[in-house]
Image (cartoon, rainbow, N blue to C red):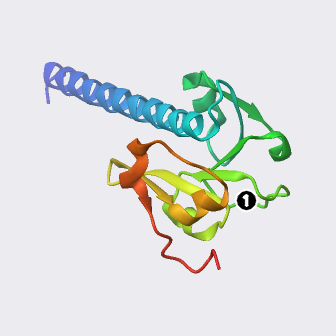
């Protein structure tokens, strides 16, 4: 293997890595922007106080203009959960970034998650109604009837 071949291989590898890194950053930014849009449509406020359960705080800090993070879930308008955690506050509106967590948590009204590199958005109609949430018509195709027994 010649030095020139090795340098070319290194250059191509770095280009691929840079492209992957850029795509990953754009995906993360898009995720935060979508969560912001959903929260804005739920609360109809300019600034929304969020409590993060396992969701990377640095993403919110880097990409969000509307979210303000709190460490006290009682003070939060919205809980964004990526993993199941023990919560001392009850009755809060929850969005998850995990479909299975949406099924497991009765206070979770919806989920935005990635599956096979594609974004997915889902809301449970009965949970939205229970929380008194009316989303704009743009969301109609993402609202489904509950299919689990956790709400009974």
Measuring from the top left, give residue 145's x and y in whole percent: 46, 69
Q: Is residue 24 above or below residue 125?
A: above
| Residue 76: quarter of image | top right
**Along the line of sight, the residue nearer the viewer: 4 or 90:** 90
Nearer to us in this view, 151 or 6: 151
Placement of the N terminus among the 4 image quadrants: top left
Foreground residue among 111 and 44:
44
> Residue at point 83% right, 40% down?
75
Residue matched to label 1: 85
Residue 114 visible here: no
Where disc 1 sits, the SS reads loop
Residue 85 in sight in this render: yes
Left/right placement of residue 137 relative to residue 38 reads left
x%, y% of residue 37? Answer: 51, 34
Quadrant into which the C terminus falls: bottom right
Q: Residues within 10 Å of mark 1 (few under 14, many from 20)?
A: few
Which residue is at a point 78% across and 61% down the rendered structure image? 86
Left or right placement of residue 58 versus residue 122 in this view: right
Left or right of 77? Residue 21 is left
Whether residue 66 sits left or right of residue 68 in the image: it is left
**In this view, 106 is above or below 147:** above
For the image, the number of numbered tags is 1
Measured as percent of width and height from the top left, residue 42 is found at 59, 41
Q: Quadrant of residue 16?
A: top left
């Amino acid at each position: 293997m010649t030095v020139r071949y090795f340098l070319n291989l290194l250059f191509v590898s770095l280009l691929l890595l840079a492209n992957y890194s850029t795509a990953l950053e754009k995906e993360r930014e898009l995720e935060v922007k979508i969560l912001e849009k959903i929260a804005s449509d739920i609360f109809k406020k300019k600034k929304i106080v969020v409590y993060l359960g396992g969701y990377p705080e640095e993403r919110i800090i880097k990409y969000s203009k509307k979210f303000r993070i709190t460490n006290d879930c009682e003070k939060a308008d919205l809980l964004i959960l990526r993993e199941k955690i023990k919560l001392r506050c009850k009755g809060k509106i929850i969005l998850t970034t995990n479909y299975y967590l949406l099924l497991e948590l009765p206070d979770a009204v919806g989920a935005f998650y990635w599956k096979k590199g594609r974004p997915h958005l889902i809301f449970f109609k009965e949970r939205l109604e229970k929380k008194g949430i009316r989303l704009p018509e743009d969301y109609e195709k993402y609202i489904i009837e509950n299919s689990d027994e956790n709400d009974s």
